[in-house]
Image (spheres, grey):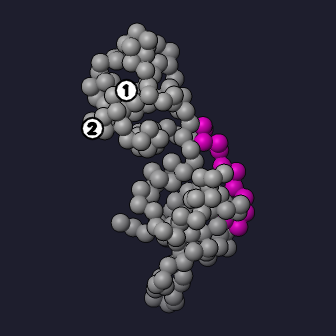
């Protein structure tokens, strides 16, 4: 697995995950500083650089609110705990529009849920009341840390202090 680096905003808010190559470029261009470093240096033919684990941007970046972030299957599955919102199964997961698109439903965080294929097929083109199938939790925009989880399912221990602070905020 390629090494990944947690990117913090100037305010120490976690905003992204990037490759080590991208992080090094940001540091060398003085657009970011290394906050947590790896034990081993990053060797190049002409020099030795710090291997970043966590970097902080030198300037504040306005991040679009999470409602505006792109909806992806992986983000919806992570938000819903990788289980069907109708029956609780974790097998054969798909994405379901609570109000079907053909009935005027939008592709928004408030209208998509994780569904197993059998439930999705059974609900079909019907509204929840018509199918007597209601999501276990109301669909909503995901918490910001969902996007970090999707980008890096296995997070290094060095990230925890920065992610724990974001979860509390």
In the displayed structure, 144 sits above or below 157; it is: above
Query: What residue do we see at 40% from left, 9% from top?
Result: 130
Q: How many marks?
A: 2
Query: What residue do we see at 43% from left, 69% from top?
Result: 3
Query: What residue do we see at 51% from left, 62% from top?
Result: 18
Region in magenta:
57-68
In the displayed structure, 107 sits above or below 100; it is: below
- Residue located beneath label 1 in the image: 86
Which label sits on residue 91? 2
Sooner in the amino-acid sequence: mark 1 or mark 2: 1
In the displayed structure, 169 sits above or below 69; it is: below
The N terminus lies in quadrant: bottom left
Image spot of residue 96 (x, y percent): 40, 27
Secondary structure beneath disc 2?
loop
Instruction: Classify residue 151 as left or right of residue 87.
Output: right
Residue 102 picture quarter: top left
Determine the main secondary structure of the stretch shown in magenta. loop
Secondary structure beneath disc 1?
loop
Image spot of residue 143 (x, y percent): 56, 44
| Residue count near mark 2 (Cα–Cα under 10 Å), binned few <14, some 14–19, many ≥20 | few
């Amino acid at each position: 697995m390629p090494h990944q680096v947690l990117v913090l905003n100037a305010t120490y808010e976690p905003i992204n995950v990037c490759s080590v190559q991208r992080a090094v470029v940001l540091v060398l261009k003085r657009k970011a500083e290394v906050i947590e470093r790896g034990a081993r240096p990053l060797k190049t033919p002409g020099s030795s650089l710090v291997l970043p684990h966590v970097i902080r941007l030198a300037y504040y970046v306005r991040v679009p609110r999470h409602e505006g972030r792109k909806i992806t299957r992986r983000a919806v599955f992570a938000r819903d705990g990788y289980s069907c919102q109708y029956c609780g199964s974790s097998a054969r997961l798909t994405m379901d529009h609570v109000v079907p698109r053909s009935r005027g439903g939008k592709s928004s965080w408030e209208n998509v849920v994780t569904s197993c294929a059998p439930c999705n097929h059974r609900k079909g083109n019907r509204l929840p009341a018509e199918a007597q199938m209601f999501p276990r939790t109301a669909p909503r925009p995901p918490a910001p840390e969902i996007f970090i989880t999707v980008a890096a399912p296995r997070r290094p221990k060095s990230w925890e202090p920065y992610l724990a602070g974001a979860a509390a905020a």
